Image: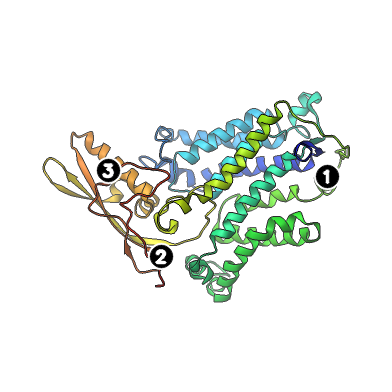
Amino acid sequence: MNKFLFKHIDNSALIVFRMLFGALVFLESAGAIATGWLKRTLIEPEFTFNFIGFEWLQPLPGNWMYVYYVVMALFGLMIMVGYKYRMSMIAFTLMWSATYLMQKSSYNNHYYFLMILSGIMACLPAHKYASIDVMQHPDMKRISMPNWCRWVFIFQLFILYSYASIAKMYPDWLDTSVPELLMKSKKNYALVGDLLQQKWVHYGIAYGGILFDGLIIPLLLWKPTRKMAFFASIFFHLFNSFIFQVGIFPYLSLAFAVFFFEPEVIRKLFLKRKPLFTENIVSDPNHVHIFKFVFIGYFVIQIALPLRHHFIEDNVLWTEEGHRLSWRMMLRSKSGNTTYRVVDKATNKVTQINLRDYLTKKQVRSASSKPDVMWQFSQRLKDIYAEKGIDIAVYISSYLSVNGRKSQKYIDSNIDIANTEWSHFKHHEWILPSNLDENN
């Protein structure tokens, strides 16, 4: 195992990836400002639905989040050129992680992926060549890296894509119900809107998605199929970028290709003046046992997290319990009607809550279909009324449709949600049983 992990290989791929990664996170940060995403998500709301347990993480007041994102964009540029790389990478990781954890109305697996990828990059020697750091400190220049620096990306991608493929293997995806629902919202797209409504396109998306996610990493690793797989990746990710508009993720996914091609190919394309490393060196790091414990432990966690919903009652498509951090991407369509009823415990006075009085349009969608957000909003209402000296109960009436099915009662309207406890790893009884496993 030591030979596999610590054998030195040419580092051209990592150096090029650092440049691409820095450019992309710059675009992600600057794009959040330019597109209005930052304003809609972190500035306009009175408060954000943070990840439970991170209530202390809230956006900076006023327009200071613009400054926050400008700083992140600057760190992206510093990463790209390799200037004070370690500090820049750690700072970006912390800042991006904070914005991810402080809001989930715009939850996206890609944001989670960028968070853990940033953490990985902070640990790698990606600034040892073609960087300002090397220009200022020539003694740190290196043309090689340990083999694990390449395989940490490959293992992570294999886990991501494998779970994404497996998650699609359920009836509503296999009969193309979900792709059809997803494409209905794209019918007004210029040139391709009508094409996306064709049944054969839905089958292509359904089964092409399963096959691509399940096979892309093995096909990229095997030299005879590598080029074919790369061109398939270009089509797949550009399609996702155009149709689903998922930010930098498609281009970040394409950037990973540098770790699958031979170092000589990458060097000739991007770093023509760089010497090619060809020596046979195995160099164990200090505290090698601690390193292996952390390396293996990290991937055990990555493999285990997406499995947790199997140990929680009912269907994850219905309950959402165990959905996050599990690479379950664009798998279902939800719609429904939800109302909140506040009862003054002292007077029994009932108040119907108008969600728009408290939440943005995007937050209303989450507070109408996601149990953890429903629970958090109930806590929010409890706190608001407590400031007025009123002790309340909060009851939710919710009917939900998943993947076009007939609406079904979602929440037990007789339970005071504001006075229940939240658990990350077990089922909440106030989420009523689903009928998703029935043939209807």
Can you tell which quarter of the image residue 29 is in? top right
The circle on residue 267 is 1
Q: Nearer the viewer, residue 325 or 103?
A: 325
Mark 2 lies on residue: 436
* Residue 118 image position (x, y, % from top left): 61, 38
Alpha carbon separation for disc pair 3 and 2: 27 Å
Number of callouts in the render?
3
* Residue 199 image position (x, y, % from top left): 54, 76
Among numbered discs 1 and 3, the one appearing first in the sequence:
1
Drawn side of residue 48 relative to residue 283, left or right: left
The circle on residue 418 is 3
Amino acid identity at mark 2:
Leu
Q: Residue at x 22, y 53 (%)?
A: 414
Amino acid identity at mark 3:
Ala
For label 1, the crowd category at 10 Å Cα-Cα, with few meaning under 14, some 14 to 19 and many 20 or more, is many
Q: Secondary structure at mark 2?
A: loop
Quick check: can you spot residue 77?
no
